[in-house]
Amino acid sequence: MQLREFTLITPTIEAGQVFQAIESAISVKSINDAITKSKRQSQRQRKLPPHLVVCLVIAFSFWSKAAMREVLKNLVDGMSGQWTRLSQYWKVPNSASISEARARLGPQVMQRLFKQVVRPLATPETPGAFLGGLRLMAVDGTLLDVPDTPSNARVFGYPGSRFGHHAAFPKVRLVLLIEAGTHLITDALICPYRMGERRRALKLLRSVGSGMVLMWDRGLHSFRMVQTTLARGGHYLGRVPANVKFEVEQVLDGGSYLSWIYPDRKSRKKGATRVQVRVIEYTIETSGQAQQTLTYRLVTSLLDEQAFPALLLAQQYHQRWEVETTIAEVKTHLLGRKVPIRSLKPPEVVQEIYGLLLGHWAVRSLMLQAAQIGGISPLQLSFTGTLHVLRRAVAKFQSAATDELPLFGVG
């Protein structure tokens, strides 16, 4: 039996060929626009042009446990099958070439693409996404380990520990704004560990606006969070720490009362004055062997007790824990690595994290589309199940003709 002879090729691989499966989530146009606006167009034909590198960085989140070359093979698997049938062979670039291509691309393209693409997508028909006509949003933060290299340690820093030692890995702080009813991450900030979560959360309020109610945990409570949310035209529903005291101004029905929150020294110097708040206090009794009673105190700008009863707000606040589920989707289901981020240099770390967030966006936005077709909540669908389907779909869509793709139209 004679082996077939293969011709070595250097194909022109377009982003539209690679990511047809998620075109409705991340369009080719948005990828090309981000590259153009960041001035990262390739001046000559390369085996790894910028748009292919963008797709590859996003694909790191789909095949997080695979090495970079293996991810690239998975990414073009459908096209490789077509080349094989034509007795053609594309030699996959080595890891050094991939690293060089990533360095050429830089982090700005991925950051710009993230900002172009992400936005709240829930409609009034999306179950659990709105409260009294207000879109439910939540803010929270998490930490990601990065490889222990001198440059990563210098830029991102370590948490301190006892006896003057530091943690095993440098850490990146990631603060997220999330649409609670869909788990879509609609804004994010990446910063060194030493920058506090509260300070970053304040900056994320740039994406809060009218028609939204923002939920936060007690670690993020501050006068400036309240003031800035109101200045943006939004409402808030946040938990407050036990050491924050409120005077009862007027008792309302249903277990709430009106009070005031006063500005901190810095805000007072800028002319800020007290803001009226509604305080809701309630207790939760836990079951099991370690039974205990937990006391919660919430503050909100939703002062109308008829439109927003205290019990309803207390129930809705616990939807804030959807943030923790979203973070688990990112850190556990998409990553699942001992050291979640693989990049050895800070610019590539930032690039990779934006690729991770875009990967999560692709999975979650496709889940929302499927849920809308089925008339159910997107939170009823399996994230890991959708991820498995998407991994298979990337190659299958590459092998199919354009008129054979009716499932996900261009959004």
Image (tube, rainbow, N blue to C red):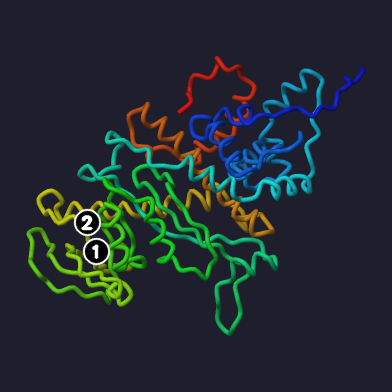
Q: Are circles 2 and 1 on residues that touch, CB within 8 Å?
A: no
Q: Position of residue 150 (x, y in %)?
A: 70, 68
With 117 as the anchor, is 108 left or right in this view?
A: right
> Residue at horizontal 54%, vertical 42%?
113
Disc 2 versus disc 1: distance between alpha carbons? 14 Å
Instruction: Please identify, in this view, whether the residue under mark 2 or under mark 1 is nearer the observer.
Output: 2
Placement of 283 over or under 81, stated as above or below: below
Near mark 2 (Cα within 10 A), the count class, few <14, some 14-19 or many ≥20, is some
Q: Quadrant of residue 82?
A: top right
Q: Quadrant of residue 97?
A: top right
Badge 2 amino acid = Ala
Residue hosting label 1: 285
Q: Position of residue 257 (x, y in %)?
A: 12, 65
Q: Position of residue 134 (x, y in %)?
A: 25, 45
Placement of 41 over or under 284, stated as above or below: above
Label 2: which secondary element: helix
